[in-house]
Image (cartoon, rainbow, N blue to C red):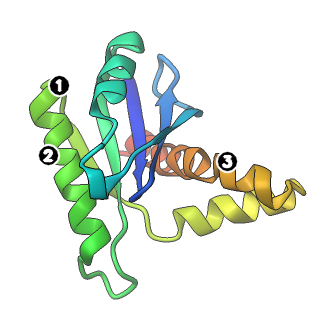
Amino acid sequence: MRVMGLDVGSKTVGVAISDAMGWTAQGIETIQIDEDRNMFGYKRIGQLIREYEVSKVVVGLPKNMNNTIGPRAEASQAYAAAIEAKYKVPVELWDERLSTMAAERVLLEADMSRSKRKKVIDKMAAVMILQGYLDRQSNL
């Protein structure tokens, strides 16, 4: 059972996949999207779901720090609903507050240049979202 993690932004979607046992998350790619032009990368997501035999998708839900839902979280909810409808795979939303900041910190500690960080930050955030979800599942 593989799980896919997604960090959905307005310009990119970071993608991570779990190992077959559902223990660890690995970043696999960053998909370029354009919300303004209704280009959401759904086709590529579908290809990855099939290629990795994904049985569940976890989409990061960027709640506000006061636990409310803002425009970005609403966009993530809509993205999750579209993935579930298009590919008939269960989708869960996962509170991702601070995941991008945590990913940035990890990359800074690795002494990665700003230009390289920009290329991998969304993929790393997807890893952190998925790993948080996997860790929580193993503790249930």
Residue shown at 90%/57% (left/top)? Answer: 111
Q: Which mark is residue 119?
A: 3
Kind of element beneath mark 3: helix
Q: Which mark is residue 28?
A: none
Question: Crowding near pointer 3: few (<14 within 10 Å), some, many (20+)?
Answer: few
Kind of element beneath mark 1: helix
Marks 2 and 3 close (CB-CB < 8 Å)? no
Residue shown at 20%/57% (left/top)? Answer: 77
Spatial distance from mark 1 to mark 3, Cα to Cα?
A: 27 Å
Q: Is residue 118 above or below residue 127?
A: below
Q: Type of residue at label 1?
A: Tyr
Residue 80 point in image, percent of width and height: 22, 46
Counting residues from the start of the chain, the first of labels 2 and 3 encountered is: 2
Q: Type of residue at label 3?
A: Lys
Counting residues from the start of the chain, the first of labels 1 and 3 encountered is: 1
Residue shown at 65%/58% (left/top)? Answer: 103
Residue located beneath label 1 in the image: 87
Question: Closest to the observer: 73 or 11?
Answer: 11
Question: Crowding near pointer 1: few (<14 within 10 Å), some, many (20+)?
Answer: some
Residue 79 in the figure: left or right of residue 132: left
Q: Is residue 27 above or below residue 6?
A: above
Which mark lies nearer to you, 2 or 3?
A: 3
Spatial distance from mark 2 to mark 3, Cα to Cα?
A: 27 Å
Q: Residue 86 falls in which quadrant of the image? A: top left
Residue located beneath label 2 in the image: 81
